[in-house]
Structures are given as C-alpha cells and as structure tokens.
Amino acid sequence: MDPWTLANAVVSGLLIGLVYGLSALGLSVIFGVIRIVNFAHGEIMVVGMFFALLMFRWLGLDPLLSVPLAAAAMFGFGYVLQLIVVSRVSHLPEHMQFLLLAAIAIMIVSALLLVFGPDAQGVHVGYAWDSVAFGELIVDYPKMFAAVAAIVVAALLLAFFKYTTTGKAIRACADNRMGAQVVGLNVGQLYALTFGIGAACLGAAGAIILLLFEVHPYLAPGYTLLAFVIVIVGGLGSLFGALVGGILIGVSEALAAVLFQPSMKSAFSFALLILVLLLRPQGLLGKAVR
Amino acid sequence: MKAIDLFLSPLSAAGRWLGAVLLVVLLLLPYWGSSYVMTVATTVFYLALVGQSWNLMLGFAGLLSIGHALFVGVGAYASAYLFSAIGLPPAIGVVPAVALAVLIGLLIGYLGFRFAIGGVYFALLTIAFAEFVRIVVDHVPWLGATEGFFLKVSAADRHGIDLANLRGAPEMYYYLIMALALGALVLCRYLLRSRLGYYWQAIRDDPEAAEALGINLLRYRMYAVAISSGMAGVAGVFYAFYQNSLFPEIVFNIERSIEATLGSIVGGVGTLFGPIFGTFILTPLGEFVTEGIDLLKHWRVIDPETKLDGLKLLVWSFIVVLIVLFKPTGLWPWVCHRLRLTRPGAEG
C-alpha cells in the first residue's frame, strides 16, 4: 500500500481522535469524581450536535462558534440532571445507577427522534472542501479546525482543574469525599458542577464534531460505546489517558478503514476494548489499583 | 408434585386464587383474543422469558449483563442457519444453538471472572462482545450479512401444529412461548431454593464473605452465566422461527439488551415474578401508547403525518427512571404486599 495513503489515514484519524478524546474527557471527569458511569454519554453529545445544528440554521452560526454556547447549554443540563436525578440514587447499588442512566439515555434518543426525526442532517460551511497540502499529505480544514478546537477546550479544562480553587475542590472530592466534607466543601454542589462540566465537554465535542459528520438520533449509542472504549483503553478516571485513548482509537479506526473495510472499523475498537479489559483493566495509563 | 408444592408454598390463598384465574384467562386467550391481542401476548411471554434469563444473572447472582441480545441472537442465528442449510428441525437444532449460546456465555464469563472484572466493567465486557458479534455477523455473507437472514414460510405453514419444525398457527407459538416462560419461572423458583441458588445469593450480597466461606466464586458464577445464556438461547430459537427474519442491526442491537432489563427493573430485580410482572405492565402499555396515537391520528386530533416513532420507548424509559428513583426494589414486592399475595415472611 502507498505510504502516503497510510500517512493520510493516520493524520485524519489523529485529528478526529482528538475530538473523540475531548468527548471521552467528559466521561472520565464524571466517573473520576462522582464514581458514576454516565451511560447517557453519547446521547448528551448528540444533543450538543443538534444544538449546534439549530444555531447554524437559526442564526447561521458556524459550529465552531457555537461551541461555547453548546457547552453552556449542556453544562446547565448536566448540572440539573445530577442535582435532581442522579444524586438521588447515590445510595443504590452500582448497577441501578447504570440502569437509571441507560433509561435516561433511551429517553433522550426517543425525544430527539420525536423532535428531529430519524434522518441524518448536517451543516455546510464555506471551507468544507478546503484543505492544505504538505507534499502528498492532505489535511482538510474542517478536521484541522475541529482538532484545534478540541485541544483548546481540553486545555481549558485541564487548566481549570489544575489552577482554580473550584477545580482543586472538585479534585479534593474525587480523592476523598469524606475528607472534602469534613473541611466544609459542599460536595453535592461540587458533584452537580462536575456533572455539568462533563456534560459541557460533550456539548463542545458535539458542536465540533458536527463540522465533520451529519447528525441523527441513532448516533448516540455508538458515541457512548466509543467513549467507553476510549476511557477504558486510556484508563477510566485519568484525564490525560482519555485524550491519548481518543487519539489511539481515532488512528486505529482510520487505519482499519483503509486496510480492511470502513464498516469493520468499530469491530477493531471493540476487540481492542476486550483485550484491554482482560489484560490491563485499569487502562493503559490508569493507576494500578482499582 | 414436590415441584408444584415448592412453587405454591409461598403463595397465600388470595395469591393462589389470583394465579389460577390469571392462568385460566391466559390459557383461554386464543378463544376470545383477536390476532392483535395474540401478538401482544406472545411478545409479553417472549420478553418475560428473556427478562427471566437476565434477572437470573443480576438478580440472583449479582452479575450485570447488558449483552443479552448476544445470547438471544446466537440462539436465533444458529437454529435458523442449521434449519435452512441442512434442514435440521429446530426441535433438534435447539440443542446445538443453545450449546453455542452457553459456550459464548461461558467464554465471556470465564474471561471476565478469571481476570476479576467486576461490576460495571463486566457489563461493558458483555456490551463489547455483543457489539463485536453484531459487526462480525454484519459481514458474514452466509448469514445474510446486513441484508438479513430469512426462513422460508408458505401459506400452508400458518395452519396446524408442527412443533418439530416450529411451523403452525399463531396459537401454537402463543402456547409454546407461554409454556417456555412459565417453565423458566418454575426452573428459577427451583434454583432459588436449591443449594446453588443460596450460593448465588451469598455471592451477590457479599462476594468476599462467600469466598471466605469456601464458595468457589468462579464456578458458581459460571453456572449462573451458563443457565442464563442457555435460557436466552432458547428464547432466540423461538424468536427466529416466530419472526422468520433476522437482521444483525435488530437482533444484536444494544437496545434489545436494554429491553431485556426493563421488565425486570419495573417488576423488581431479583424477584421471581418481577420480570414477568414487569413485561405484563410495559408491553401492553407500549401498545396502548402506539394504538392511542393511531386513534388520535384517525380522529385527526393530531396530524396523521406526524411521526411519533420514539414515543413508546420514551414512555417505557420514563417509567423505568421513575421506578429507579422512587421504587428501586420494583413494583412486584409492593403489589404482593398490598394484595397479600404471599404468606407473611415468604418472598415472591
């Protein structure tokens, strides 16, 4: 096979993988702090995509410009969801929480189906077909812009957790919930904030990915599974691991699509997930103790 | 008789009467029910069987599976393939089909338990396997790939009773799935009161304590997975010959796996009658919603052109959310208590 074809696949997978990574960050943040596996992950992301679609249709906003808006809207959604629904089940066994979020996921897909119908819908931006060439290596603008936007949002998030007081307080909750309560942190409030931040990542990732793919409600379960694959490969709860996992999955899917069949690409992700679950359940970059 | 006694002993007099009346009504259903009612009732028992199988794993042994579509689908595809390729009647084909479902269940279970993958991680492992198989079947030409796998049906097949080939009138399918679902109920009742069932419940409630008492976790968890996937495989064989068409996107869809959980959650995870009770509520309710919309469209209350595809699932999932939030033990224990269907101290 032509090495340039492979190189193109790798670069394109890497760029998309960064957006996947941003979405997986949302899952990782929520799990790392609240210890809840958000099974409505892809659904919230698809809501973000539809949000950006409406912004494009109503206001003519480029999806990249609606990233902050989508993030803010999904932040509100996540905040309220944690505060009035998810927090009520924290005493229930893990599987009941999981099933609750699965039911919420189905509710979201069904509601989207009622409002938007099952057909794929997309946006068309002026630079959709523009690209820049480095020799035989061709990088299209939408993918490049999407990757840059994903990096910016991810960097903002990591900075928030590293430098702000609220970010530190959230990390304190993640490390030791009881201890955080003892020193007077409002854990319920911080959990709602965390779910909101996780959902905001998804809103941002959704708006960004609308630049690359058309949206329809049935995309959601696939994105949920993809994010699970990424965070488990990268290590559930590790923020940096989510980004690395995203790139890894993006590249391996792009390569699988070139070397085998495009429709087989997610089979490789699942095979990778099974392997990682079995051989290194804490993830490639996760801590050894679970 | 001992089995029947075991089954009836926890029921109070009211419970026995209600059960007897329900059984008679359901047995006589084909004599007064329309073909539509029969279809719904058949679906109810089919989902109850799949739900019972799922409940055995989570409710009895504490193992969360979100991949039950895999076991059902393997049973369905294997029996359908054997029937159309070498003419093996499903009455015999059920053996290799269920064996294959059990084998895959054991493989997932062995990998999961061997490497100590617990809780939600185990659920993700089941999802990953189900999705993997879905995509693989999508690409296997001799299983019809995305085009679907079809079983031949002639008009003459719609009459009479041919249990060996699972060909016959709708009534035959109804009685068959009813017998299977009730059989699964009796089996679960028996298992729950056996040594195996007590081991499972001990493992479910506290795996470490159970292990300290000398229970071999791996072995008894494997039993749970084997029996559960086998039951799902039987349901799959029924599904194949009832539907006569199999599509990987439908059969192995993760929505099927989640559907398998809904009835049990509504009825009560870990209870014996929960799955069947839950599906008896959810399925007719879903049909009621669908029919109600059609009626409203007919009367032009709502525009007939509106597409309301997602409404049934929206209602179902909303009920599940309410149940998890406000009655996480499910409706069956509560109904039982209210109507005094069980004797004091006995659980349903």
Image (cartoon, helix red, strand yellow):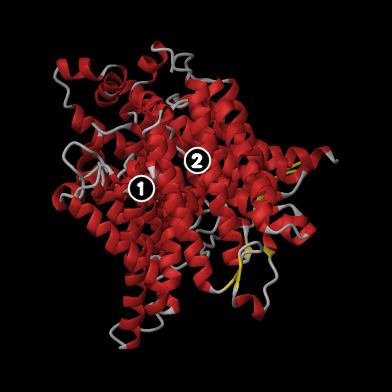
Q: Is residue A231 above or below residue A180?
A: below
User: Do the CB atoms of the residues marked 2 and 1 lie less than 8 Å apart?
Assistant: no
Q: Secondary structure at mark 1?
A: helix
Nearest to the observer: residue A245 or residue B133? B133
Q: Secondary structure at mark 2?
A: helix
Instruction: Give the residue type that dot 2 points to.
Output: Ser
x%, y% of residue B269?
Answer: 33, 42
Q: Kindly report the distance in space between the C-alpha atoms of the residues bearing marks 2 and 1.
A: 14 Å
Query: Disc 2 vs disc 1: which is toward the camera?
Result: 2
Name the residue at 42% across, 25% down: A237
Residue B295 relative to residue B217: left or right: left
Name the residue at 31% across, 22% down: A174
Instruction: Give the residue type that dot 1 points to.
Output: Ser
x%, y% of residue B140?
Answer: 74, 52
Are both tags, 2 and 1, on one chain? yes
Nearest to the observer: residue A68 or residue A194? A194
Q: Quadrant of the N terminus of chain A?
A: top right
Residue pointed to by mark 2: B228
Nearest to the observer: residue B34 or residue A175? B34
Count the numbered circles shown.
2
Q: Chain of mark 1?
A: B
Q: Chain of mark 2?
A: B
Residue pointed to by mark 1: B264
The residue positioned farthest toward the front in the image shown: B1
